[in-house]
Amino acid sequence: MRTYVPTPEWIVLDWHHACIAAELLCIQRCTGCGRWRHPPRRFCPACQSDQAAFEPVTGSGSVLSFAVSHRSLDPGWQAHAPYATLLVELDEGPRLLAATTTPPGEIRIGQRLAVRTEALSENFVLVWADPASHDEPTSMAPRARGNPHD
Amino acid sequence: MGTDLWGTTAIVGVGETDYVRGSDRHVCDLILDAAMEAITDAGLKPADINGIIPPPGYMSTEEIAAHLGVPDVAYHVSVLMGGASPTASLQTAAMAIAGGLADNVLVCMGWNGYSALRPKPDARPTKRVMNLGPMGETVRNHYAPYGLMSAAQHYSLYLRRYVETFGIPEDAAAAVAIACRNHAQLNSKALMRGAPLSRADYDAAPFIAEPLRKFDCCVETDCATAVVVTSLERARDLVHPAVVYLGGAEGHPEPADEIANRANLLELGIHRAAPRAFARAGVSPHDIDVLEIYDCFTYVVLLQLEALGYAEPGGAPAFVANGNIELGGRFPLNTHGGLLSQGHCWGLNHVVEATRQLRGTADAQVTDAELALVTGYGDLGDGSVAILGRDR
Ligand SMILES: [Zn+2]
């Protein structure tokens, strides 16, 4: 169904390997100052430390935005059109894209999500997110890096 | 420092091929045709060119020089900002000239934007491709596995946020699409000349990636354009009235190499480039007579108009309403039809059109146009701005 599975390299590959080993979503965390960051970066933008580890996260987050694709160049995805892709803000702060089984019409910005991973190869995990079973009010969602203008 | 650069160079030659879906010409022929036309338009010979900025991909400076017969390339550089590249290239050309590194700089763009994915059965094959630059890695690793391969899909991640945050109505996007299509009816080279667009057509078209409908998306085209930049002093001895490069800038969002982790999803490169460009040119947004705004997608035009200061955040719908951006309005926008309706030449066609407007020779001429503003937009939100003016 998903026809395109990349073979990442460098620190992106390290991230995928960490998620596969933990069987959980892991995110890079600065050893120097404790800040989480994604996608993986060599140096911490806050303290410049290059010491970091991939640590499991809670898997909770919310919908910051989402794409609804009606056309896809990938036949595997085109078969599912229209499909949503979620831009997830994890409770720890970092954001990433996630596939979802939820129909586009049922997705709302601010909706609470539970995130999980699926290993598609030895070198790649796909991140999935769907509404959390107990939908908390969005005002309760922790906002590690909220910005009133975005 | 700034006084030695801004306002001391000028665009003196422009060239453009036809804008077509499925060219019979090899992509290299398109690029070289436009380049030779720009040199000739300036009243120069290839031997007068000694600076080259090639397209992002397809052809190298070395090949371009050899095929045109440019004997002595003193300076060249590639600018890799996707659709922001050509407009950003003007500042690079100006720096090279003001710094004495080159005298006459050729800026080229051209591609097989339509035929790359759908070659005609008898078309001359090519293995030449665009240089995706920094976005290639991000798309390959982080977006494509989630079914997001096209620019429409990538940008829809923040365009949804824009639409929902401010309640942007489809009316605003439709106004941009229809203004560009109306202007294309007047442009002799526009791909969509003869194919007017009504609001009913716009509304009836399917979504590509929400909020983008079919007519919110630019037209993929085979085409090429080129311009020649020289010093204002030399420009005054050449064929056409000099079109002065008054100021320009580039800007990049943070981080520039991916969308998701920007503190503000709606703060793009142009938000940083615009104030720099206006300050360098010494003009304000309301001094401008013609707007040539990078229009890969209608909603991206709205966001850029806000970044440029023509409206508050969320205020662009009022700006584009009531014919304000149509020929005859206060701020005619994309008078050639833009990427949406003339054709997609990475915005160097916007620079060509701005030059013609300021020469007074555009097909859809804005009366007494003295100042034009061009934007570029590309990769995952890089931006560039150029402010051009008639020589006074
Ligand atoms: Zn740190």
Image: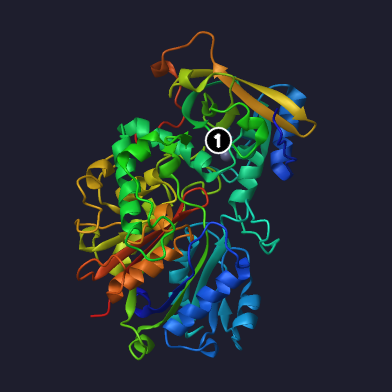
Q: In this rendering, would A8 be left or right of B149?
A: right
Quadrant of res B60: bottom right
Q: In this rendering, would B184 be left or right of B332?
A: right
Q: Is residue A133 above or below residue B347?
A: above
Q: Circle 1 is placed at which residue position?
A: A71
Q: Is residue B63 above or below residue A13?
A: below
Quadrant of res A114: top right
Q: Is residue B7 visible?
A: no
**Label 1, ligand 1: CB separation under 8 Å:** no
Q: In this rendering, would B348 be left or right of B68?
A: left
Report the chain holding disc 1: A
Residue B136 percent across, percent down from the top left: 63, 50
Q: Residue at x 62, y 59 (%)?
A: B131
| Tally of numbered discs | 1
For the C terminus of chain B, the quadrant is: bottom left
Q: Is residue B261 visible?
A: yes
Q: Residue at x 60, y 72 (%)?
A: B29
Q: Amino acid at mark 1?
A: Arg
Ligand 1 shown in quarter: top right
Question: SS class of the residue under badge 1?
Answer: loop
Q: In this rendering, would B17 be left or right of B244?
A: right
Which residue occupies the foreground of this view, B149 or A99? B149
Residue B73 percent across, percent down from the top left: 59, 84
Which residue occupies the foreground of this view, B372 or B273? B372
Q: Is residue B85 above or below residue B9?
A: above
For the N terminus of chain B, the quadrant is: bottom left
Residue A17 percent across, percent down from the top left: 75, 32
Q: Residues within 10 Å of mark 1 (few under 14, many from 20)?
A: many
Q: Is residue B31 above or below residue A83?
A: below
Residue A131 percent across, percent down from the top left: 53, 16
